[in-house]
Each structure stands twice: as structure tokens, then as C-alpha cells.
Image: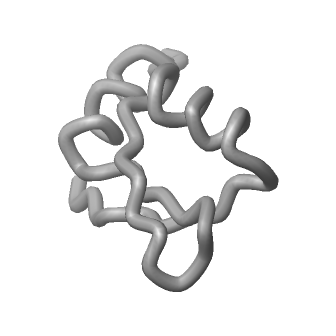
Amino acid sequence: MLITRRDSLALNKELEKHYIGAMGAVHIGILHEYQFAVLPESSKKLLEVYSYEWN
């Protein structure tokens, strides 16, 4: 499975800090003050925890 970087915008600094702590996101802040990204390494960890295979 190919996982690419996902850029997003947070509503405020407090919410961005939550995403950084909870999801391993990183602050970018180029196009928007609260722009962040979830990098492939963090995405893979999230998918391992929250993806369930139903057989």
C-alpha cells in the first residue's frame, strides 16, 4: 500500500498541537498558519492501530 504525505489545516493552534501529539503530525505553516502534515511513517502507525481486517 502506498502512503503519501497528507497536508491539512487545523482550525487553531490548540487543535494543531493536538494533531501533532496524537497523530505524529508535523507543523508546516507555509500556506496557512496552522498547516500541518501527517508523514508516511506516522500514517503507517495509524493504519496499523485503526485498520481492522474483517474475515
Picture quarter containing residue 17? top right
Q: Position of residue 5 (x, y in %)?
A: 32, 64
Q: Is 37 in front, or is 50?
A: 37
Q: Position of residue 32 (x, y in %)?
A: 60, 76
With respect to residue 19, does 29 lie above or below? below
x 80%, y 54%: residue? 11
Numbered disc total? 0
- Side of 14 relative to 49 (left or right): right
Picture quarter containing residue 37? bottom left
For residue 51, say whether it is visible: no
Q: Position of residue 10 (x, y in %)?
A: 70, 54
For residue 46, say whether it is visible: yes
- Side of 41 relative to 5 (left or right): left
Looking at the image, the residue that sits furthest to the bottom is: 31
x 65%, y 63%: residue? 9
With respect to residue 17, does 10 lie above or below? below
- Side of 47 relative to 42 (left or right): right
Q: Position of residue 34 (x, y in %)?
A: 61, 60
Q: Is 30 in front, or is 55?
A: 30
x 46%, y 34%: residue? 20
**What colouring style does the render use?**
one colour
Looking at the image, the residue that sits furthest to the right is: 11
With respect to residue 37, does 30 lie above or below? below
x 53%, y 18%: residue? 54
With respect to residue 10, does 32 lie above or below? below
